[in-house]
Image (cartoon, rainbow, N blue to C red):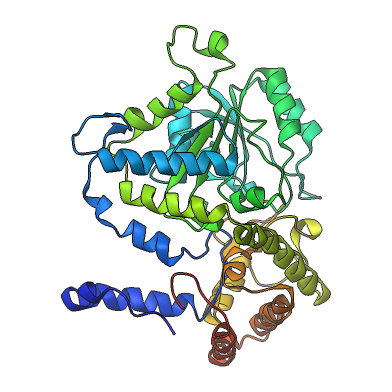
Amino acid sequence: MTVERYPHLKAEDPEVYELIQKQAQMECSTLKMIASESYASFDVLEACGSIFTNKYAEGYPGARYYEGNEFADALENLAIERGKALFGCEHMNVQPYSGSPANAAVYRALLSPGDKIMGVPVSDGGHLTHGWKVSFSGKDYLQIPYRPNQETGRLDMAEVRKIAQAEQPKMIWVGMSAYPFKLDYAAFAEIAEEVGAYLVADIAHINALIIAGVHPDPVPYCDVVTSTAHKMLRGPRAGFIMSKVEDRFHEKYHPTSKWNLAQLVDRGVFPTMQGGPHLHAIAGMACAFKYAQTAEFKEYGAQIVKNAQALCAELEALGRPIAGGGTETHLFLLDFRKDEFTGKDAAQALSKCGIIANFNMVPGDTRPPAKTSGVRLGTAALTSAGMKEEDMKKVAGWIDEVCKHIVSNDVDAVAPRIRGEIAEFCSGFKFPGITE
Ligand code: DSN
């Protein structure tokens, strides 16, 4: 049962209230397998809906451009202290409105328009803001692409080094939206050092795995680390940036600047990219950082990977190929290159049956990006609801069944039954922020 909330909204704006209720109902009766989604807890949702939404606080704690910020200062400092303790970083900025604004601030802080950066193209699992052509990051900066090997699906660090040495980028982005393997930050750091590039990790997809200790930690190796606070961290729709304090390329790239790296990052966020911080989101972030320090959260982080690996194994046993042959993270790509149907066909059929995912390019894909040969599946949300390895057997069974019905062209006929089975299955779990 979804928890009855929002009495004022229900009375004042029943249309919005109804849509929220319908979304809540959908989120607890379907399998949420979009790899970048999870469930924010009640406390995070309450903090995000708090009166901190009213307040302007341009600037940073102790140096604001508006009065009346005693509690805003305390709140932002609390979020920063919790975040620094969680990740063990030297400096943290919690003001970015989300992941893309956080990344934009890093570009503006450290680079000049036209500078060369290295990043993975979106078509190969990278993020828009790592230099993709339609994003500001590809329009204002020159992306030198590096990509996972088309056969193995894995990054080849010798190849990354070769490209970096030939191109001498000023910044290397590491972190992807559709890469199922562990990232070798130590190897990236060596390469960045050799070519004199800033190394920036975007850990939006994998922050909980890092906290749980089941994925390497970029903080010791990178100049800057960016992240979202939602996705598997289960905080608010917001972003944050971690950095070292000293700018190791001060002489090389910013000889006349009076700012260190931490100050450059802060200035990149405000005033360069943003105005007033979203204090209500910072309140939610403080709550998420507190919960992420618990043993329960670390268990969740480790369970996400166990579930993804169990699901992969079940699907492979059912004859469904996985790009790269498996996963070491929270996600993997079902590979439909040999099938008649596309990734988009599969994502739409799965959605009709109550399995919510997205179509995605796979390594070596020959279909266009609007169709693709893959579906990206993630286990963070299912793990938040308490699902374990044995539950992945059922999930794999439904995915396989839907794929068979795409071939027999009768998805619409079976969708109500499968949707009903999934809703019944979901009723046995507790969905944070929705059910109790
Ligand atoms: N849009 C997110 C994803 O789905 O991976 C990345 O920001």
Q: Nearer the viewer, residue 279 or 140?
A: 279
Q: Residue drawn 76% across and 73% down?
A: 315
Quarter in which the N terminus is drawn: bottom left
Q: Nearer the viewer, residue 283 or 142?
A: 283
Q: Position of residue 351 (x, y in %)?
A: 54, 76
Tell me if residue 411 comes above or below residue 195 in the rendering.
below
Q: Residue furthest right?
A: 317
Q: Position of residue 400 (x, y in %)?
A: 71, 79
Q: Position of residue 266 (x, y in %)?
A: 41, 28
Can you see residue 95?
no
How many numbered discs, if any?
A: 0
Can you see residue 71?
yes
Instruction: State the image quarter where residue 284 is shown.
Output: bottom left
Q: Residue drawn 32% across and 28% down?
A: 271
Instruction: State the image quarter where residue 193 is shown.
Output: top right
Q: Residue drawn 68% across and 24% down?
A: 192
Q: Nearer the viewer, residue 124 or 381?
A: 381
Q: Position of residue 331 (x, y in %)?
A: 66, 59
Horizontal relation, residue 338 to residue 104: left or right: right
Horizontal relation, residue 273 to residue 129: left or right: left
